[in-house]
Image (spheres, rainbow, N blue to C red):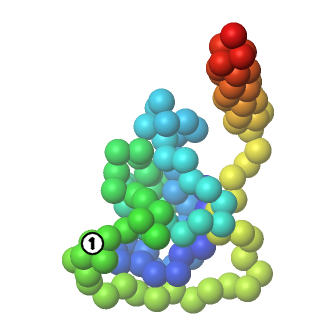
Amino acid sequence: MDFRVHRAWKGIERIPVSVNTERDSAACGYGFSTGSEYLVYAYGEKGHLRVFLCSRTQRLADVRPEELAALGEPTFLPEYEDWPPLIHIQDHPVYSALVLAALAVLVTTYVMRKSKAAH
């Protein structure tokens, strides 16, 4: 995944930043959403950064103010107008299949509960 970084606290001097994570949460992958802002705790060497589900990575809106204060002052990085969306995630047929399977489970559960309530 490639990130457009606005602020960096440690280890990032330039953009873009590529971060690797596993494809699903069962393998400790972090499920980033396109268009959301995150405080990312990445591990590894420059150019080989990784993010895990159990890291402190989280949506920026969910970060407690005291956590940001503990990090200190960030470095503000320049923005590029011609950069792609915040996160570029390649399309994978596996994700589509998982979403469809989850939807099927939800619909089946809804129908079963509704039919039990009707009896």
Q: Secondary structure at mark 1?
A: helix
* Quadrant for the N terminus in the image: bottom right
Q: Residue at x 59, y 66 (%)?
A: 36
Q: Against 48, is 52 above or below?
A: above
Q: Is residue 14 left or right of residue 46?
A: right
Query: Toward which corner of the image does residue 41 lie, by quadrant?
Result: bottom left
Q: Position of residue 114 (x, y in %)?
A: 70, 21
Is 66 in front, or is 21?
66
The answer to whether residue 108 is visible is: no
Q: Residue at x 58, y 38 (%)?
A: 23
Q: Which residue is mark 1?
A: 67
Is 87 in front, or is 106?
106
Q: Against 41, is 27 above or below?
A: above
The answer to whether residue 109 is visible is: yes
Q: Position of residue 70 (x, y in %)?
A: 22, 77
Is 56 in front, or is 75?
56
The type of residue carrying mark 1 is: Glu
Q: Residue at x 77, y 81 (%)?
A: 82
* Quadrant for the C terminus in the image: top right
Q: Position of residue 54 (x, y in %)?
A: 35, 45
Q: Against 114, is 55 above or below?
A: below
Q: Position of residue 63 (x, y in %)?
A: 37, 68
| Furthest-front residue in this view | 119
Q: Is residue 42 left or right of residue 29?
A: left
Q: Residue at x 72, y 76 (%)?
A: 83
